[in-house]
Image (cartoon, coloured by chain):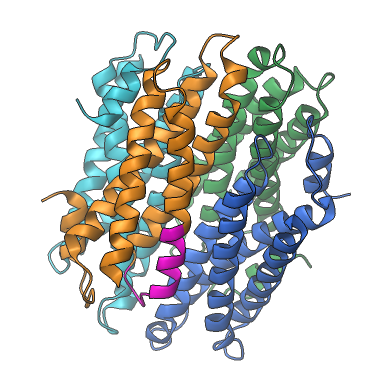
Chain colours: A orange, B blue, C green, D cyan
Amino acid sequence: MTQVGEMLRSYPADLGRVDRDVLARCIEECLSCAQACTACADACMSEADEEMPMLRKCMRSCMDCADVCDMMVRMLSRHTEYDANITRAMLDACATMCRSCADECERHAQRHAHCRICAEACRRCEQACKDLMRALG
Amino acid sequence: MTQVGEMLRSYPADLGRVDRDVLARCIEECLSCAQACTACADACMSEADEEMPMLRKCMRSCMDCADVCDMMVRMLSRHTEYDANITRAMLDACATMCRSCADECERHAQRHAHCRICAEACRRCEQACKDLMRALG
Amino acid sequence: MTQVGEMLRSYPADLGRVDRDVLARCIEECLSCAQACTACADACMSEADEEMPMLRKCMRSCMDCADVCDMMVRMLSRHTEYDANITRAMLDACATMCRSCADECERHAQRHAHCRICAEACRRCEQACKDLMRALG
Amino acid sequence: MTQVGEMLRSYPADLGRVDRDVLARCIEECLSCAQACTACADACMSEADEEMPMLRKCMRSCMDCADVCDMMVRMLSRHTEYDANITRAMLDACATMCRSCADECERHAQRHAHCRICAEACRRCEQACKDLMRALG
């Protein structure tokens, strides 16, 4: 079991009916996506001078997406007094952010490996958020 | 002018049709709300032993709300390659979070001054998010 | 009194011997500095194509400084089980970060108003961190 | 290779002489530690009413440590215009924070599995920060 899964198992109160594997998966994908986005925004900044201007939107999306995914990790790592409406609203917003960032990163995936890896992380995170929304009912 | 307003004015590209005062106000309320929520969660933790268990939901809400408002400040402080759909989705989620946190803090406002002040900050932030959504059209 | 000051006053336990005005001031300067740094990194990204490459170090410093100041705001907004050694170590690191970011932003202050405003916010924050370190003894 | 390692490899400029495995390891341990700390603070909050007051220091440490490690992940994920002095100062502060949080969590490790797992994550993160400091020279 991963550490995220172990922490879920050690939660001392009732987690409700949520599928723990789906929840753990979503936390892990948000962690990966946040890190990939921070690194991709930075890598874009270190591309050649003439490349940088074409990567403005990519940098912006990656910075936003890192912030949103960091927030999502924290919210999903808390279970005390769980509020389904808040969680669903945030998962929906996070999935929207990840899809948008993936779309932009994909446009540069052939030229820049960091954009390709980041786009993949965003797609997995978008899917994990949607899977968790379904699991929450 | 506040520093947030000065930074908006110094942005070198086009900010679009957004009302700068409404945008600056929203950034400032998100900053205040995030700080109040972090402080309120901590103050709850320092209440008397027999009070703490009644403040679980308040602590949880405040921690989430601080994370969401911190993310919102960052997103609203960026204007490069602005995406109206993402911004609106996040403002909507942020307003929902603030309303929920305000509702919970208000329940303890008479007993705890920090909950009263925090509830007020959350209400102002909720309103500022809604005002900005309207201003964005 | 500012809201940061009001939250400090509403803390239900003993704040120790710290000067509340110096503490409140430091929290406020960290909040301002974090916001200015996020906005300055973004403004750099929207400068003309030929300017961007000269602003790499500025963007990098601003992004780091925003992250450090955000962390500092949170730590200073908590008073439960205060640990002087941790607080001092972080204030020292934060002051170092702010000085470094101010130095870099100042190099561009004449060309870009956002760099000038950001450098000033970093300087004030550096000073506020040092003042608080002294006040903590 | 992990995704963190893949992102390091895709960085388009010179990473300098740093040992990439040590750097990737440190980023991963900071990610794990931040998540464990957020989850442990929350789990403490859901312990039985009579346990909560004994966990105040643990909750506080975990919240601070999560904030510091999140900041550290971001700083270590950026390589543009790397500044050895800033990085070393932050790694030192982060190691101090992790050691302190591990010490506190260990005091509750026998009673609470989440404290045991979190203490282990903090110890690994402290070590990874020290290893990276050595690798940076």
The residue at the point 19 percent across, 66 percent down is: A19
**D30 shown above or below B98:** above
Count of numbered marks: 0
Quadrant showing the C terminus of chain D: top left
Q: Nearer the viewer, residue B122 or D54?
A: B122
The residue at the point 54 percent across, 32 percent down is: C64
Residue B68 % position (x, y):
53, 59
**D28 shown above or below A89:** above
Q: Is residue A3 left or right of residue A73?
A: left
**D25 shown above or below A128:** above
Residue A136 % position (x, y):
29, 70
Q: Which residues are magenta?
A: A79-92
Q: Is residue C14 left or right of residue D37?
A: right
**D119 shown above or below B53:** above
Residue C73 % position (x, y):
58, 52
The residue at the point 47 percent across, 51 percent down is: A96
Residue C81 % position (x, y):
43, 64
State yes or no: residue B57 in magenta.
no
State yes or no: residue A91 in magenta.
yes
Q: What secondary structure characterizes most of the magenta part? A: helix
Asked which quadrant contains residue D8, the reply is top left
Q: Nearer the viewer, residue D116 or A70?
A: A70
Q: Is residue B54 left or right of residue B62?
A: left
Q: Is residue D132 left or right of residue A51?
A: left
Can residue D100 be seen here? The reply is no
The residue at the point 27 percent across, 84 percent down is: D50
